[in-house]
Image (spheres, helix red, strand yellow):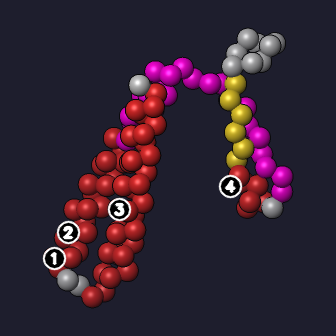
Amino acid sequence: MDREHGESTEVFVDLRQSYLAASAPIVILRPVVDQQQDIQALKKARSLLLILLATCKETLLALDAAANALDTDMTDDLRRMIARSEGELQALNGKIEALN
């Protein structure tokens, strides 16, 4: 709690920046949003992820149907992206359920 301003804050560490810079982690303070805003943000992220997932699956179907040997790298990338996105979707659903 920021006693001076009466706000709750959330602390998180940006490890990507510290990894790239090979320095100490960067600590960022930001206001904690209420639970309803968290749920809305997670649902928006889930919707965008569903669009990405559907697009990847349809693109993969088209590439598989074309059976073009030159597209093997792209189809492999799409398969990995689909698998990763499905895992992220499960994680988002778990977070949404936990907040409800």
Left or right: 57 as drawn, with respect to 82: left
The CA span between labels 4 and 3 is 23 Å
- Check disc 3 and report the residue beneath it: 82
In the rendered view, would you say 17 is above or below 79?
Answer: above
The CA span between labels 4 and 2 is 34 Å
Verify CB contact (< 8 Å) between mark 2 and mark 1.
yes
Magenta-colored stretch includes residue 17: no
Verify CB contact (< 8 Å) between mark 4 and mark 1.
no
Verify CB contact (< 8 Å) between mark 4 and mark 2.
no
Placement of the C terminus among the 4 image quadrants = top left
User: Most extreme residue toward the bottom, as rendered?
Assistant: 69
Left or right: 34 as drawn, with respect to 94: right
Label 4 vs 2, first from the N-terminus: 4
- Check disc 1 and report the residue beneath it: 65
- Residue range in magenta is 23-46
Residue 45 seen from this side = no
Label 4's element?
helix
- Few, some or many residues within 10 Å of mark 3 (<14, 14–19, 20+): some
- Check disc 4 and report the residue beneath it: 16
